[in-house]
Image: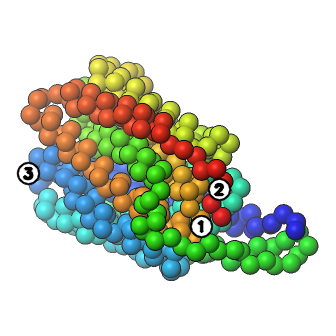
């Protein structure tokens, strides 16, 4: 039996589109949220802690949605699910541009945005990659996962530049148009569900073998899934806390809007590099090393941030925190190593259910700052949490053979 051939152009085209639809769902709604929050606080007469609570509500809803999305990806066309998500994302942008009070904003982030980020998020993206890739899967997953951080590189400077020109409402509406007219046609035209056969060297077609899917109880019986979830939470709770509070945190350190956007972009660039590096290393050395190193780097970055008093030190702290991006690649890579493609969607959906718990970070940090008048103590607590995550990651055991 000769080596299999896959349509290479189609594979990498699909990876590119997974980046595109993740950018569309996250770029303004999440990655640029911090640049709207102070304006909303003044206009809607709401404290920042109340506005950041939108993420708590959104993530609470995601707890119930994500497992179903994983099952849907295993049962239905991912192409169709992504298209629905893109349409919902465009509707979300239109609706946010029309809000007149904080409660409306919270309602949209609780009802509509969870649909957007689940159907245009990591579960369908990584399910497509797991279906189309065998060798080099970790690196491909890293490329797909950097869509989350690429949005953080591209959008903050654009949003900050657009706000004084078209206002915050106009900014949301312009992106709504771009998502509808550009993103939707590209996703529909490029995405195909994974090939059900592979072409052999002699031209014959062989059916792709399918392992029977596992139940939720069988998936949760795997020791590694709990270790990966624990490490992920210990890193992502601090990341979301300092990312959503980035603008007010940097304002308290006398850093202006454009400089803050630059730091946000730098952190996202580092996260992209961490995702790609984690995928490369996981393909060659397994997942344990990048799990430990990324968690430890975030802990160090938070320590630097806690005591930083100038722009350069703040930038160094946020750059190190960008190592958290590796965790998104590893969340998918460890799932792909542990489970067969026929179970990947459900398993990754279950594992992703832990991610909404990270929403406690932004509210906790903002609330602690409002009571103490400083971000320092809260950031130190988050640093300790990430250090614990690095210790937990040491317990991970690479499966002896890849899932088939």
* Kind of element beneath mark 2: loop
Of the image marks 2 and 1, the number of the one nearer the N terminus: 1
What's the distance in space between the residues labelled 2 and 1, CA to CA? 11 Å
Name the quadrant containing residue 88.
bottom left
Q: Quadrant of the N terminus?
A: bottom right
Q: Residue at x 31, y 21 (%)?
A: 308
* Residue 188 position (above or below residue 402): below
Q: Residue at x 50, y 43 (%)?
A: 396
2 and 1 marks in contact (CB < 8 Å): no
Q: Residues within 10 Å of mark 1 (few under 14, many from 20)?
A: many
Residue position marked by numbered label 3 in the rendering:
45
Q: Quadrant of the C terminus?
A: bottom right
Residue position marked by numbered label 1 in the rendering:
341
* Kind of element beneath mark 3: loop
* Kind of element beneath mark 1: helix
Return the mark for residue 402.
Answer: 2
Of the image marks 2 and 3, the number of the one nearer the N terminus: 3
**3 or 339: nearer the viewer:** 339
Q: Residues within 10 Å of mark 3 (few under 14, many from 20)?
A: few
């Amino acid at each position: 039996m000769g080596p299999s051939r896959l349509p290479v152009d189609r594979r990498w085209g699909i990876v590119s589109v997974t980046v595109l639809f993740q950018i569309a769902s996250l770029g303004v709604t999440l990655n640029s949220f911090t640049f709207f929050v102070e304006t909303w606080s003044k206009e809607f007469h709401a404290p920042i802690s109340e506005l950041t609570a939108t993420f708590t509500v959104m993530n609470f809803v995601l707890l119930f949605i994500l497992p179903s999305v994983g099952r849907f990806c295993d049962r239905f066309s991912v192409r169709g699910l992504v298209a629905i998500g893109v349409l919902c994302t465009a509707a979300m942008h239109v609706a946010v541009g029309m809000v007149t009070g904080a409660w409306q904003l919270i309602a949209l982030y609780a009802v509509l945005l969870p649909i957007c980020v689940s159907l245009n998020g990591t579960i369908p993206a990584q399910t497509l990659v797991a279906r189309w890739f065998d060798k080099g899967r970790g690196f491909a997953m890293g490329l797909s996962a950097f869509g989350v951080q690429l949005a953080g590189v591209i959008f903050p400077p654009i949003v900050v530049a657009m706000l004084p020109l078209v206002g915050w409402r106009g900014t949301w509406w312009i992106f709504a148009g771009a998502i509808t007219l550009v993103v939707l046609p590209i996703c529909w035209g490029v995405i195909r569900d994974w090939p059900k056969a592979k072409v052999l060297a002699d031209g014959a077609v062989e059916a792709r073998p399918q392992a029977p899917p596992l139940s939720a109880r069988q998936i949760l019986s795997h020791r590694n899934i709990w270790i990966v979830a624990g490490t992920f939470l210990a890193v992502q709770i601090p990341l979301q806390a300092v990312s959503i509070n980035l603008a007010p945190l940097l304002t308290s350190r006398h850093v202006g809007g454009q400089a803050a956007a630059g730091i946000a972009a730098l952190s996202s660039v580092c996260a992209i590099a961490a995702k790609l590096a984690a995928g490369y290393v996981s393909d060659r050395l397994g997942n344990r090393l990048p799990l430990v190193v990324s968690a430890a780097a975030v802990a160090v970055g938070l320590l630097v941030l806690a005591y930083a008093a100038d722009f350069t030190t703040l930038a160094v702290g946020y750059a190190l925190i960008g190592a958290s991006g590796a965790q998104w690649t590893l969340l998918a890579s460890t799932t792909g190593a542990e489970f067969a493609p026929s179970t990947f969607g459900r398993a990754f959906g279950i594992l992703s259910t832990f991610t909404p718990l990270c929403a406690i970070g932004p509210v906790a940090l903002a609330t602690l700052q409002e009571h103490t008048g400083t971000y320092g103590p809260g950031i130190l607590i988050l640093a300790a949490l990430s250090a614990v995550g690095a210790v937990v990651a040491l317990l991970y055991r690479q499966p002896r053979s890849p899932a088939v």
